[in-house]
Image (spheres, rainbow, N blue to C red):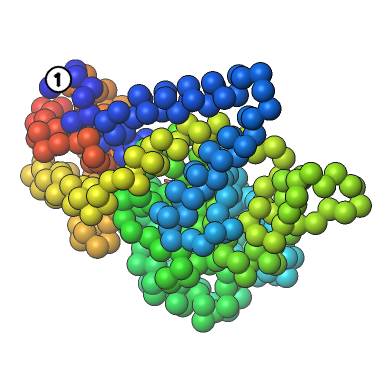
Amino acid sequence: MAGAPDGQGYFLYHSIGQYPGKARDMAEGMARFSEVWGRADDLQWPYALGVRQSYIDRWRAIIGAPEGTVTATESVTAGLGALIGALPDAALRGRRLLVAGDCFPSVHFLLAGLQDSRGFTLDTVPLRPGAHWVEDEDILARWGADVGLALLTWVSSTSSHRSDLGPLIAHGRRMGSLIGADITQGAGLLPFDAMAPAVDFTLSTSLKWMCGSPGAGMLHVAPGLIAEARPTLRGWFSQPDPFNWDFDRFSYAPDIRRFDHGTPGIMAAAASLPALDWHAGQDKAAILAQNRALSDEIGEGIAALGLPFVSPRAEAARGGSVMALLPGDRPAPHVIAGLREKGIAADARGRTLRLSPGVMTTAGGVAHLLRTLHGLLK
Ligand SMILES: Cc1ncc(COP(=O)(O)O)c(C=O)c1O
């Protein structure tokens, strides 16, 4: 198998998901789009907007969200920026915005930069000394009635720790906070229901377990919050009818379309829809069972190699990845390059080796990974 990128040794589902036939499906989807777009007629927009709506509807099915509550965004960061920009001033001014220290850095960068203009204090729940993730109970302990909004990271990208959203959301409701969930690392692998327990908004991209393309983000906003939202980034597509061009008659659409603005960028939806269609046809329980079985094998191998775990050992507290700490005297880039030479795709953040088995990964691939790691680390 060495050197053959057949997917058996592919462990990057936390980064870019792959499935057999992805390149072909994507090429066909893009070719279809190009063919329609390049035709000298006037039928481009019905097709392009239909593709975008199909993309949105696939996402609605993944998170169980009703019609009119999901739209496409460029990224998680862009979706969060749009959401914060749409909130009434009183939702945040003089209040805390709660986030955990193991959230995705990009959302922290965004929120930290918005504190002054929106008048909130960003409160980051720290990791305990020596810990690799933030404990749910530490988030609960810090979550008082002065929290205007809490952004929960369902599955952490640096440990694959999976928060137990139920108790967190129940507590947040008692505190009267707005609650959002970044589901990027779990969406499409682990079941998620935006309605039970209900969140106010949900953010993700299509890149990981759904195997989509860059630029294909998703923002879900619950109807009650949509009604209060006044997106600052607005335009003709925020209206019930984009073809109202009367300067004095702007109005927001009654549903999630108010979060749209200029001419929608369709390309990422067109590039990702074939993968989302593929994903919709899969046996989700089987995909998860395969991930769990291979994760167990990786976990046992990591333990046998004596590498400290960065991920929780308990399956219920873990997303789709197994992460381990590389020895200080073996630089991670060297280890990753050594794996690549043997046809194994993985990555590292600092000393943390990240391994995420998905639909193309096999037990043989895991055995090859563990043998190769043994050779590189001895
Ligand atoms: C938890 C989490 N949130 C968000 C993102 C991506 O954010 P963005 O789409 O803004 O780049 C990632 C990417 O790895 C992630 O792991």
5 displayed left or right of 133: left
Residue 332, percent from left and from top:
29, 31
Q: Is mark 1 within 8 Å of ligand 1?
A: no
The amino acid pointed to by label 1 is Ala
Q: Residue at x 55, y 54 (%)?
A: 70
Disc 1 on helix, strand or loop?
loop
Q: Residue 367: name its quadrant.
A: top left
In front here: 41 or 219?
41
Going by the picture, which residue comes out furthest to the right? 248
From the viewer's perspective, tell me whether residue 61 is left or right of residue 247: left
- Specify the quadrant of the image occupied by residue 225: bottom right
Name the spot of residue 316 as percent of width and height, x first: 24, 63
Residue 41 appears anywhere in the view: yes
From what the image shows, is residue 139 above or below residue 341?
Answer: below
Q: Is residue 120 visible?
A: no
Residue depicted at x 9% and y 33%: 364
Is the residue marked by circle 1 packed among few (<14), some (14-19), or many (20+) residues within 10 Å?
some
Instruction: Say which residue appears at 25% left-offset and 36% top-offset.
Output: 11
For residue 76, side relative to residue 283 (left or right): right
Residue topped by disc 1? 2
Of the pair 346 and 202, the residue shown nearer to us? 202
Q: Residue furthest bottom?
A: 174
* Left or right: 377 as drawn, with respect to 332: left
State the quadrant of the N terminus.
Answer: top left
> Residue at image x 27%, y 56%?
318
* Position of residue 313 measured from the top left corner of the image (x, y, whole percent): 20, 57
Measured along the vertical axis of the image, is residue 183 above or below residue 29? below
Q: Quadrant of the C terminus?
A: top left
Q: Position of residue 258 (x, y in %)?
A: 69, 54
